[in-house]
Structures are given as C-alpha cells and as structure tokens.
Amino acid sequence: MKPIWIVDDDESIRWVLEKALARENLATKSFANARDAIAALEYETPQVLVSDIRMPGDSGLDLLQLVKSRLPGLPVIIITAFSDLDSAVAAFQGGAFEYLAKPFDIDKAVELIRRALDESLRETSVESGPTETPEILGQAPAMQEVFRAIGRLSQSNVTVLITGESGSGKELVARALHKHSPRAAQPFIALNTAAIPKDLLESELFGHERGAFTGAQTTRRGRFEQAEGGTLFLDEIGDMPFDLQTRLLRVLSDGHFYRVGGHQPLKANVRVITATHQNLEQRVRDGLFREDLFHRLNVIRLRLPSLRERREDIPILVRHFLVQSAKQLGVEAKRMSDAALQFLCSLELPGNVRQLENLCNWITVMAPGQTVEIKDLPLELSQEQGSGGASAAPASSGAAAPAESYSAQQHHGTVTSVAALEGGMNGAGSPDAWLALLESQAASMLSGGQQEVMAVLGRQFESALIRTALKHTHGRKNDAAVRLGIGRNTITRKIAELGIDGAKDD
C-alpha cells in the first residue's frame, strides 16, 4: 500500500498527523508546501492526500485541481480553518473527498483518513479489474445458465421466447442472441407491442401502402421489412391484440406478409425473438392468446431470473450503473459504502435491474457525498423494507413497479425539485444534465406502460419550478410569478391545483 501524503506549512499539524497515523501502522510522507508535493507526483503517487487549503505559494485548491486532473480516483481531504468554510465547500464541489475544519479532533481525523483509505483501496481494486464491460453483467449461477443458453442458441435460427419479470433485462438477452448470431451484421429491430396503440400496431409491424388509410401519405416499411436479414424482437408479446396474432402466426408459418392496403406478398427473412412478463399458458386458457401462436413462439423458452434470485450480482451491477450514470452526467462516479451495498442486497427490488439502474441514477444526482451511506438512500427504500411493501408488489404486473422510478416520485424525484437537483449535482456536470434525467425518466415510464406521461411529468415540472421560485422569494407568490414570467392569477391557480404550501401575498 502506498503512503498517505500530508501537505501543510504548519509543522505541528504535520507532526500530529504523522504520529497518529503511525500508531495505526499507516505509512506517511509529509510536504511543507504544495509545490514539493506537485513535484513528487511526477514519480510517485499517494494512497490518500491530506492538504491544508491556505499555504504560501500554490494553495490546497490548486493542488486539488491538479490531482483530480491526473488521478481522479485519489481521495483528497482538505484541511481548513472555520473562516475558510466557503473555500472548503468549493473544494468539496471540486472533487475533495471531505474536509477537516481546524481545530480538529485527531481521532476523528484518523477515522476520516481511514474511510478515504478504504475508498482508495476499493477504487484500486475496481480499476485493476477487466476494463471491457460485458454486454450482460452477472456472476450468479442463474445468470451463468442464461449465458450458456445464449451460447447454444446464438448460432441457431430458431424462434426464442424470453420470459421474466418486468425490468429483468429481456431485451439485453435478445440483443446478445443477435450479436452472437450469423445475422449480427444485419439489423436488430425492437418493438414493444404494449407501447403501440392497437390501431397503429399492424402498420408498425407490416408497413402500409400509400392511401391505405387516412393520413397514409406515403408507402411505409414496417418492422419486418426493416429487420430483413436480421432479428426482430417483439417485447410484451402477451399484450398483442388477438386479430394481429393471426397475422403474426401466418408470417411465422410461411414467411410471407402483406403491407396494410397491399396486394403483393413480401417475403420475410427475419429471426423472431419474443419476450413477455406474463404467463402465456394462462392467457391461452383465458382465450386472450392463440394457442397455435403460443406453440410457434415457444420453440425454445429462456427464463431470465429476477434480481431477487441473483442478489450476489447486485454489487457489480451497482458499480456499473454508477459509473455509467456519472459518465452521462459528466460527474465523478459515486461509491457505495459496504453497509449501503449490503442494505441494497437485502431489498426485494420488484422492478429488478431497471429499478436498480434508476436508483443509481438517483444516487448520482441526489446523494450528498462521494461515498454513499444508508442514510443517503431514498427514504421509501427503508420504509418498504420495514413494511414489506417491496415484496408485496406484484411481480407480474404490466405497469412499472411502485419503487421503480425514483426520479419521478414526489419527494425524491429527478424533476421534483430543481433546487434539490442543483444541490445534488454539487455544481458539477453539464447544464443539460437534468434534461438527460428527464428523458431517462420519460423513457422508463413509457416502457413501463404508464399512461398520461406528459401530464404526470408536466405537473411535477410545474410544481418544481413554482416551489423553487417561492423559496427564492421567501414565499412571496407575486414576486415568484414575475421571476417565472407568468401571471399573478396563473400562479395562484397553480399553487391551489398543485397543493403547494408556504405561499403568501407580497
């Protein structure tokens, strides 16, 4: 393990920290100024860096900026006087692991350095691992069975039915089957049959001729034509309307289809992979799904395990999603403490991998520090664990699970509070980061089958803007209306409609 560097022009502080860390059997190296530390970085690096913020010559902030540009994963602890708290906050936003305010308790200082050391060692372990992320993550025995099945099926042209709970990653498996097949160089076309209105689904699948119906101004190729030579993935096949099931059966039977309004048969050279979270056998018994189509689709069935059946994969999934989310937002990736990670592994997570990904997006934006503790997680997680609410959620429901979309919930939402979002970003990331989160949330709600997405998100967006404006104007609604560029009557009506408290007349 590399030594802990102490950079401070005050010899007494260097001496105290050196002696305290030596008692913990931790090696140290001290510098009286930032210039010498910067020079030493040319040929060696520390495990943790502890630096004063005000020193002759280069400051601790200068050193922090340089270190973060060269070694973004290195934890840096800033030492500051109480009068320098503004600078400490700036350092924290600039990537500092934490700051120590003078005068500090030596035991607490050692404890903080220990925490930073654990993070540094964990970061080193992650960096020394494989650099190429596999398309599907999973080390659990249940996932290894899935990987073996993908390997056996990839070179075949056989129809595959993928089953599993919502959010378990069925489309990823379909893409893997395509990627490792002889059709990999041809298109992979995905269509969620539950997300397309019944009246449009036939045209989406098979295309239409010009003039086939009102609004058909031009001839349009359907998904079967778009996927020619490749793979067509039909998600939520159990929700396909009964009359369209007949047309799909005909394509699977003889490989030909007609565009809507067309008279010329078209040949389909397409491998069809379907997926559902529903019990198709029960839907056949209920008369909602054609039995002959079921047998056509159910040539090979591949069941994807829920996240509850592969809890040992949660840590690697969390690390992957936190890095992925941080890259999208242009910020440094957060890290989970051992206790927080163990807590996540104990949850039911009815929304499966999709819920875990949404949670990691929430953590990236909303968690206050770089190391995430249990107390930093959404409050509803602990409430659900205590009440058993997560396990009570129906696994086969077509709608998004209640805990699945943290970024749209009332008190912990991506667009719930602009002020909270800005605070969670700590001033880092791109100015359009909230737009990326909004798009991600909309996509999650649409794929989950939620209705009136525009109305739901629009209401939350208006509430976020008005609440934030009222906070800035100390509750004066007329002043807030001016700031927002809306009328006084409009903001009064919106406050009543949205149930916003704390507003007052100017």
Image (cartoon, helix red, strand yellow):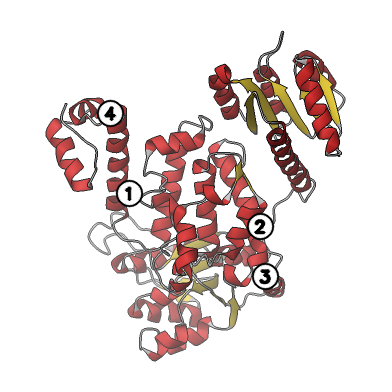
- Which residue is label 1 attached to? 457
- The residue that appears at 54% across and 43% down in the rendered structure is 364
Badges 2 and 1: C-beta atoms under 8 Å apart? no
- The residue that appears at 33% across and 79% down in the rendered structure is 243
Q: Is residue 101 above or below residue 422?
A: above
Could you say which disc has been placed on residue 143 in the image? 3
**Mark toward the start of the polypeptide (4 vs 1):** 1
Relative placement, left or right, of 170 versus 13 is left
At mark 3, the secondary structure is helix
**Mark toward the start of the polypeptide (1 vs 3):** 3
Badges 2 and 3: C-beta atoms under 8 Å apart? no
Relative placement, left or right, of 82 versus 213 is right
Residue 202, by quadrant, is bottom left
**Residue at mark 4 to residue at mark 1: CA–CA distance:** 25 Å
Could you say which disc has been placed on residue 474 in the image? 4
**Mark toward the start of the polypeptide (2 vs 1):** 2
**Mark toward the start of the polypeptide (3 vs 4):** 3
At mark 1, the secondary structure is helix
Residue 72, by quadrant, is top right
**Residue at mark 2 to residue at mark 3: CA–CA distance:** 15 Å
Q: Amino acid at mark 3?
A: Met
